[in-house]
Image (cartoon, helix red, strand yellow):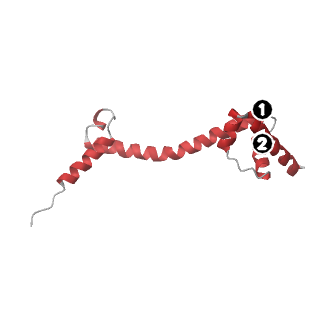
Amino acid sequence: MPRARTGAARHRRKVRLLKAAKGYRGGRSKLYRTAADAVTRAGVYAYRDRRQRRRQFRSLWVIRLSAACKERGMAYSRFIYGLHAAKVALNRKMLSEMAIHDPEAFNAVFELAKQHAAKIAA
């Protein structure tokens, strides 16, 4: 019985990996071993940074909301507390978009949160 070899499958695997490394500088796009390392590392960074992007956006929204609340004379934490007390189910992304693009609607939500925060604190 002849020995089974992985010729075609191995070639396809190498071609697929070099295609993934297309656009990398120097040997990282031409040499199999360095391309394999580069593609693996790129995948690790991509996985990690997909999660970090979400954290960074939430941080941005909180900063924007904090600035909008300070303009209106309330701390961000009190504002969020008032929203929870009022059972308002708007997330931070939508609230920050409202603060930027629709200040009248944000003012209405802010007043609602202010009333509930004062009611609980008193």
Judge by depth and name the residue closer to the eye, 50 or 95: 95
Mark 1 or mark 2, which has the lower sequence index?
Answer: 1
* The disc label shown at residue 120, or none: none
Judge by depth and name the residue closer to the eye, 36 or 8: 8
> Can you say whether 48 is above or below 66 in the image?
below
Q: Residue at x 82, y 35 (%)?
A: 73
Q: Please indicate whether residue 85 sits to the left or right of residue 16 in the image.
A: right
Quadrant in which residue 115 is drawn: top right
Marks 1 and 2, Cα distance to the nearest angstrom? 14 Å
- SS of the residue at dot 1? helix
Q: Residue furthest bottom?
A: 1
Percent across and percent down for residue 59 are 63, 41
Q: Residue furthest right?
A: 122
Q: Residue at x 71, y 50 (%)?
A: 89
Quadrant in which residue 104 is drawn: top right
- Amino acid at the residue labelled 2: Val
Mark 2 residue crowding within 10 angstroms, few (<14) / some (14–19) / many (20+):
many
Percent across and percent down for residue 31 are 25, 39
- SS of the residue at dot 2? helix
Q: Residue furthest left?
A: 1
* The disc label shown at residue 71, or none: 1
- Amino acid at the residue labelled 1: Glu
Instruction: Count all numbered tags in the image, as a single digit.
Output: 2
Q: Circle 2 sits on which residue? A: 109
Q: Please indicate whether residue 93 sits to the left or right of residue 22 in the image.
A: right
Percent across and percent down for residue 84 are 76, 51
Q: Residue at x 58, y 41 (%)?
A: 56
Mark 1 residue crowding within 10 angstroms, few (<14) / some (14–19) / many (20+):
few
Percent across and percent down for residue 57 are 59, 40
- Quadrant of the frame with the N terminus: bottom left
